[in-house]
Amino acid sequence: MKLIIHRGTKEIGGSCVELRSEKTRIIIDLGMPLVNAQNEPFDSKLLEGKSIPELIDSRVLPKVSGLYAGEEKGVDAVLISHPHQDHYGLLRYINPEIPVYMSRGARALIEASDIFIPTKANLRNVITFKMWELFIINDLVITPWLVDHSGFDAAAFLIEGEGKRILYSGDFRGHGRKRILFENMISHPIKGIDYLLLEGSMLGRGENQYQDERAVEDKMVSMFGDKQNIAFVFCSSQNIDRIVSVYRAVKRTRQTLVIDLYTAYILDRLKDISDKLPQYWWPDIRVFYFWGHRKILKDNGLGSFVGKCVSSRIYKEEISRCKRNVVMISKYNPAFMKLIGYLGDLTGALGIYSMWEGYLEQSDFRKPLQRQGIEFETIHTSGHAPERDLERLVKAFNPKCVVPIHTFQPQTYPSLFPNVHILNDGEEFVL
Ligand SMILES: [Zn+2]
């Protein structure tokens, strides 16, 4: 068996891993890069109007023979670990004959976001798997393991073939709403792992400001409990754990949660996978219609969904009247700025930044909002395991070899774990 990490040995994002047996070639994840060759933020506009050969030449697409549309199919399957763009974002370029395996939740979330984003995955030949149920691709046996991560319905993959057992960790943590999954993995580790491909996003980033999702929720409770004006929570509507944390904090403080149509639609698409996710028709949730979301939904034949939300619709006048009782999931954009222009006095209003702080380096939107009287605070916990949890996992699994992936710090692995083998992008490693 051969392992080739086409991208991801020295960076976070753009993951693409190949496993090749005598009879089979599979690709695990095909992500959009987060950084370019200079380690600056990757600009997805670079994809516009470019052919596949051009994108391979400019190293945006990893050079993988038999993977892309327009060439002979040479790959048996693509596996997607979870619905984050840096793991699936280049799927639209693959040969449509290649089956793509992912969880039901990943499929629902990718299909839902495709409606709203320009860099669409255009899913075609999808096969959904169930967690912990193995599936077979020629001579490889694959078992997906549900893991705790900020990406919904995320999997680690156990891949067995030619007498080897390989575990691809995907992205994971042990401090989210599904932390029990991580603790179960530690107490009942998968035995006999030869190679562990281990993510290390948190290495070099220091400690989490809030140690887990529960701490995030509790801090929000303390802030919502005595707020004097509206609260805006800036978070990703695809970070479902976080949406649940915000909702729970809203409920505990008897506030009303205002979501937009985009968030309402994402949550609605996931209702068959989990009936515990907050939905637009729940009594303490209201939906604000931004024109852009409504147009996109209608243009995609989803006018009936917009119609269904009407019973929960809230207008700007009502938000303005009830500011003290409202918590709003927000995104910074011109439509949002227009809305806050209607809301009148925002003295003492709360702005809660609930995403990775690295995004603020790209555009810090807090200043224009602070000028309106909004007080900012960051309340966030990472989607990734910190160093000590990575160490716990490696200790429990005791793999013969640890291969760094999805990290800017591969060189720190040998000081943390035994039997580390650092690869370069594109290097062929015989297992
Ligand atoms: Zn992720």
Image: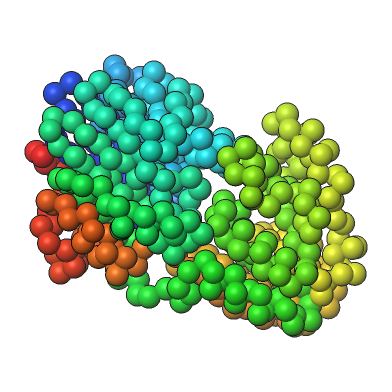
Q: Quick one: 339 or 271, which is closer to the camera?
A: 271
Q: Which image quadrant is residue 299 in? A: top right
Tell me if I can see residue 92 in this picture. no
Residue 139 lies left or right of residue 129; in this view the side is: left
Residue 321 lies left or right of residue 350; in this view the side is: right
Q: Quick one: 246 or 287, which is closer to the camera?
A: 246
- Kindly identify the residue that appears in the image at 74 percent across and 72 percent down: 253
Q: Position of residue 184 (x, y in %)?
A: 36, 55
- Kindly identify the residue that appears in the image at 85 percent across and 64 percent down: 319
In this rendering, the answer to whether 360 lies above or below 158 is below
Residue 339 lies left or right of residue 360; in this view the side is: right
Q: Say which quadrant the C terminus sits in.
A: top left
Q: Position of residue 120 (x, y in %)?
A: 52, 36
- Kindly identify the residue that appears in the image at 13 percent across and 52 percent down: 401
In this rendering, the answer to whether 44 lies above or below 26 is below
In this rendering, the answer to whether 399 lies above or below 97 is below
Tell me if I can see residue 389 in this picture. yes
- Kindly identify the residue that appears in the image at 83 percent across and 78 percent down: 345
